[in-house]
Image (cartoon, rainbow, N blue to C red):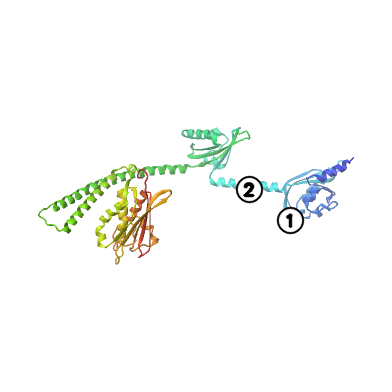
Amino acid sequence: MYSDIRILKDIIENTPLPIAVYTGSKLKIELVNTAMIRAWGKGDDIVGKYYLDILPEVKKEKFFDQATTVLSTGVPFHGENKKVDLVINGTIKSHYFNYSFIPLFDSEGKVYGVMNTGVDVTDLYLAKQQIQNVEERLRIAVQSSGIGTYEIDLLTKEIKTCDNFDAIMCSENTSNIEELFSKLHPDDLFAREKAIKESKNTGLISYETRIIHKTCSKWIKVSGKIICDENDFPIKVIGSIIDIHEHKQFQEELKKQVEQNTIELRRSNDDLLHFANVVSHDLREPVRKIKIFNGLIRNDKEANFSEGIIKYQNKIDQSAERMQNIIEGILTYSTMDKNKQPFEKIYLNEVIESIKTDLELIINEKDAILIIGELPVIEGAPILISQLFYNLIHNSLKFSKAEEPPKILISGRVVKIDKSDCVEITIKDNGIGLDETYAEKIFNAFERLHSKDQYEGNGLGLSLCRKIVKRHHGTITARGEINNGSEFTVTLPLKQKEYMM
């Protein structure tokens, strides 16, 4: 049979809790288990030596005095989270201990020794400190962000809040939930009830409401998450509130401005519509008279016109007829509801031929050569598409070189863009070219790269081209070199949406 002493020694030796026993005023080490030896890191030859001889690095600490006080008074001492710098294997390392000095009494009740127990809580202490640091940083971040946080216990109805919450809610006493809810604007209670109802499925709460109080009135946004226990029973709500009053005021002001701008835009559109009607009506009469008087001249039987004069009379008729068609088209376009105006089929080669007729004088004057490839049929607004290519061709004729006849090459090919069939049309010339630095800038309204003394124009032609192309859901780009011609590329869908945007 093992003796009680043997069993006790085995227990002390094998327990994972560090244990040592000291006696005498110098704290002679009478007993020490493996766990304490490991904690000290001083080797196995320790028994019989004195405490401060083994741990000289703790002389500046109060451990020795605490132990001798227990030895003299018989009153135990307990310490928590005490930092100790121990030299282990020649290296100083900081540790944190929970420890005790417990008096040992003999049969006569006198203290004969002190038992020292300790637990290394370094990892636990550092983890706790890290958590506290994170919580402190989070608290500072929340405080500086202006967000108010809250936590509601659904069982006790208690609520915990931060200072920001109290400031936003204009409240000093946040313990009464019903009092807080009473500050919500009556007209916004439906929004809250709806959010609570939806939260049963989503677990999330979100709504906007006004709070009304004798000292303040403002809009806030409430967010929250429902926390459930292991049985999916709601026990808590945690969340935040944000003061969105300025944001709401900005929205209201923006809404007023949009409404005012809409009214002004409608008025402007009405004015433009009236202007288009007046202009179209006023232009009809002179064109009609040109046709009448030209017809009277042609039918004058006493006049003997040469073939050249007759040719010019025919051209006057053609131009007057085309002008009349343009006026009618403008009038029709301006009076139609833009949201319901259908696109039409446009034969691009016919459009280019009509433009050649319109520009016949400048073409002949400059001995210009136009080479036109086969172009497809597209959908669009005929007046706008005609204006688009008129501007581009006229642009090439206008910016030609003085010493060289203009040569304009117009080609097209069908391409796929975003799974849609499109036509890519290129208008390339041999004119004065352009600096590619300004390849995008030339599409700005009233932008001119040359003075009016050099080349006439108002700087609106290419700007209008881009607007027309955008209206047809296409793109237009420019490239070129100085003194080496320009190239404009227009990309348009073959088929448009059902109605014009």
Residue 462: give x, y in percent of width and height.
34, 55
Quarter of the figure that contains the C terminus:
top left
Whether residue 40 is visible to the viewer of this picture, yes or no, is yes
Classed neighbour count for the residue bearing mark 2: other residues with Cα under 10 Å, few (<14), some (14–19), many (≥20): few
Front one among 340 and 301: 301
**Residue drawn at point x = 80 percent, y = 50 percent:** 37
> Quarter-wise, where is residue 11 in the image?
top right
Quarter of the figure that contains the N terminus:
top right
Query: For the view shown, which residue lies furthest in the bottom direction?
Result: 403
At numbered mark 1, what does the secondary structure look like: helix, strand or loop? strand
**Residue drawn at point x = 38 percent, y = 44 percent:** 258
Whether residue 459 is visible to the viewer of this picture, yes or no, is no
Residue 166: give x, y in percent of width and height.
54, 40
Task: Give the side of residue 455 with respect to residue 70, left or right.
Answer: left
The residue indicated by pointer 1 is: 92
Mark 1 residue type: Ile
**Residue drawn at point x = 85 percent, y = 42 percent:** 8
Looking at the rendered structure, which numbered label has been put on residue 133?
A: 2
Mark 2 residue type: Asn
Residue 40: give x, y in percent of width and height.
78, 52
